[in-house]
Image: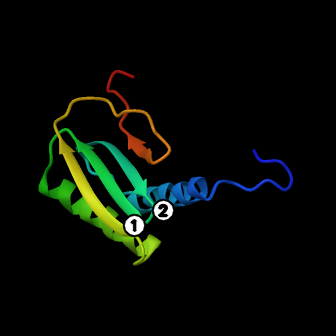
């Protein structure tokens, strides 16, 4: 928390805004085969990452819907790229100052 008179770092506020918008855009649209969804931010350039065990037509439709909704929420001044990573079988890495996960599938045996 910040004390009285202290201001938050604008990059942190921007990142939090974009994470929130991606979370909202993906509500009820998580692709069936998604292991994780994340966002990489470099000012107004954004990459939405989907880590997929495999992909189906329904998954691609869900991804298109999420990205479309996200673009509608953030407006035309944000450049959005989509990256799909298939069959990596690895757990997502930790979040950083410029990257955050908005969805990570729980392990089946958890």
Instruction: Report the residue at 30% width, 50% height from top.
Output: 49
- Considering only vertical position in the picture, is 108 above or below 44? above
Q: Earlier in the sequence, mark 1 or mark 2?
A: 2
Distance (Cα) linking label 1 and label 2 = 6 Å
Q: Quadrant of residue 14?
A: bottom right
- Mark 1 touches mark 2? (CB < 8 Å): yes
Q: Nearer the viewer, residue 14 or 90?
A: 14
Q: Nearer the viewer, residue 96 or 84?
A: 96
Instruction: Report the residue at 13% width, 57% height from top.
Output: 57
- Numbered badge on residue 70: 1
Bin the neighbour count of mark 2 within 10 Å (Cα to Cα): few under 14, some 14-19, many 20 and up: some
Residue 67 in the image, given as x and y percentages of width and height: 32, 64
User: Quick check: 80 left or right of 44?
Assistant: left
Q: Quadrant of residue 61?
A: bottom left
Residue 34 in the image, given as x and y percentages of width and height: 27, 44
- Numbered badge on residue 21: 2
Instruction: Report the residue at 47% width, 60% height from top.
Output: 24
Residue 71 in the image, given as x and y percentages of width and height: 38, 71
- Considering only vertical position in the picture, is 97 above or below 18? above
Residue 85 in the image, given as x and y percentages of width and height: 20, 44
User: Quick check: 56 left or right of 72?
Assistant: left
Bin the neighbour count of mark 1 within 10 Å (Cα to Cα): few under 14, some 14-19, many 20 and up: many
Residue 106 in sight here: yes
- Considering only vertical position in the picture, is 95 above or below 40? above
């Amino acid at each position: 928390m910040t004390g009285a008179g202290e201001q938050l770092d604008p990059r942190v506020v921007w990142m939090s805004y974009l994470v929130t918008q991606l979370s909202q855009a993906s509500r009820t649209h998580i692709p069936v085969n998604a292991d994780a969804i994340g966002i990489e931010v470099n000012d107004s350039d954004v990459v939405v990452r989907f880590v997929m065990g495999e992909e189906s037509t329904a998954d691609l439709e869900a991804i298109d819907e999420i990205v479309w909704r996200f673009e509608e929420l953030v407006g035309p001044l944000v450049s959005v790229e989509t990256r799909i990573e298939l069959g990596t079988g690895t757990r997502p890495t930790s979040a950083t100052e410029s990257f955050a996960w908005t969805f990570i599938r729980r392990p089946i045996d958890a």
